[in-house]
Image: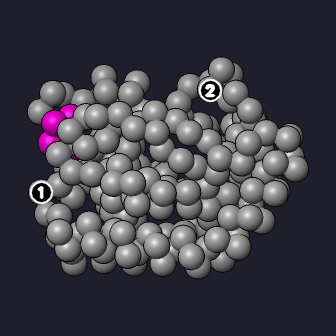
Amino acid sequence: MLKRSFDVLGSLVLLILTLPAWLVLAILIRSYDGGPALYRQKRIGLRGESFDIFKFRSMIQNADKFGGYSTAQNDVRITPIGRILRRYSLDELPQVLNVLKGDMSVVGPRPDVPAQRVLYSDTDFCKRHSVRPGITGLAQATLRSSATPEERLQLDLEYVDRGSFFLDLKVIALTIRQVVIKGGI
């Protein structure tokens, strides 16, 4: 109950504080190629149930038709504004809507695309999806995008085992540090 209250309150505050940035980002994204500012994608959530995740679009329209679910460092599908969005994790801002809907939490393992199901044993899959996925997680807070799939799984399972309100606060603080340091602010 405390976690859900924190998620709702934190998401509302973040939404209110960043709403002007949403408008600016939407205009910049749409001005690049006229496509939609928001992107929806199927992800795996709590108990393995699928949901639509919201993100600011950082790639060309129909990018999924030109490549897989993951991106390389210099992926040609990423737009110029998309590079900035990804560098500072601004593409993730619309996920506060997912948190408000109850699909996600502020902190938890990042939600996978359905194609990633094959990467897990049944036991690991069930354990990893026994909590709501998060906007940020232990893997993102400590290794950001440099984590190997094995490291990411190990950190996700560690989060499930050790999950607490204080761990969530630590993950949020570490995430902010990662975005500021790795983002180059």
Q: Which one is nearer the viewer's eye here, 174 or 147?
A: 174
Report whether 181 appears left or right of 137.
right
The residue segment tinted magenta is: 124-128
The image quadrant that residue 170 belongs to is bottom left
Q: Quadrant of the C terminus?
A: bottom right
Residue contact between numbered discs 1 and 2, judged by CB atoms under 8 Å: no
Decide if residue 137 is in sight here.
Answer: no
List x then y, in percent, for residue 54. Answer: 53, 47
Q: Amino acid at mark 2?
A: Asp
List x then y, in percent, for residue 12. Answer: 46, 73
Report whether 132 appears left or right of 36.
left
List x then y, in percent, for residue 91. Answer: 61, 55
Report whether 83 appears left or right of 100.
right
Magenta highlight on residue 76? no
Tag shown at residue 64: 2
The image quadrant that residue 158 belongs to is bottom left
Q: Quadrant of the N terminus?
A: bottom left
Work out whether 170 lies above or below 41: below
Label 2 crowding class (10 Å Cα cut-off): few <14, some 14-19, many 20+? few
Majority secondary structure in the magenta region: helix
